[in-house]
Image (tube, rainbow, N blue to C red):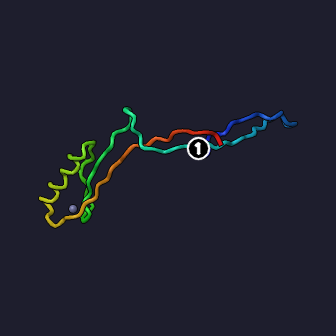
């Protein structure tokens, strides 16, 4: 994964403008689920597979699932649903390559 370049001024040329030489370095990263206490919470939402209507998002999966029962009362023929889960991840820097 590329990182910010380091800038090194080179000797001034005859036109008095400093020339900037850029050097790029690469670094390894490990991407993993973020389990830290300060991490963003998991967020859940349900979506109807027939009409694509979505229920409210919630950090409580049971509340998100509750929308399905309410949707079924108004749309008894809508029997397929998808659960959308947003889960935080963190990139942990590793060694320079
Ligand atoms: Zn529906």
**Residue nearer the viewer, 18 or 63:** 63
Query: Under tag 1, what secondary structure?
Result: strand
x, y percent for residue 24: 68, 42
Residue located at (13% from left, 64% from top):
76
x, y percent for residue 78: 19, 64
User: Taking 30 as reference, is 95 left or right?
Assistant: right
Give the number of callouts.
1
Quadrant assignment, res 54: bottom left
x, y percent for residue 31: 49, 45
**Residue nearer the viewer, 74 or 83:** 83
Q: Is residue 39 above or below residue 72?
A: above
Residue located at (57% from left, 39% from top):
94
Q: Is residue 10 above or below residue 58?
A: above
The verdict on label 1 being within 8 Å of ligand 1 is: no
Tag 1 residue: 28
Residue at the outermost right position: 14
**Residue nearer the viewer, 16 or 10:** 10
Q: Quadrant of ligand 1?
A: bottom left
User: Taking 73 as reference, is 17 left or right?
Assistant: right
Quadrant assignment, res 81: bottom left
x, y percent for residue 45: 28, 50
Packing grade of label 1 (10 A; few <14, some 14-19, many >=20) is some
Residue located at (51% from left, 39% from top):
92
The quadrant of the image that shows the C terminus is top right
């Amino acid at each position: 994964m590329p990182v910010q370049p380091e800038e090194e001024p080179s000797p001034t040329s005859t036109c008095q403008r400093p020339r900037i030489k850029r050097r790029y370095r690469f670094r390894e990263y490990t991407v993993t689920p973020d389990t830290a206490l300060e991490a963003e919470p998991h967020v859940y939402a349900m979506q109807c597979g027939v009409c694509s209507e979505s229920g409210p998002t919630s950090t409580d999966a049971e509340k998100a699932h509750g929308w399905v029962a309410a949707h079924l009362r108004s749309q008894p023929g809508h029997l397929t649903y998808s659960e959308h889960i947003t889960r935080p991840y963190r990139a942990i820097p590793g060694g320079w390559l």
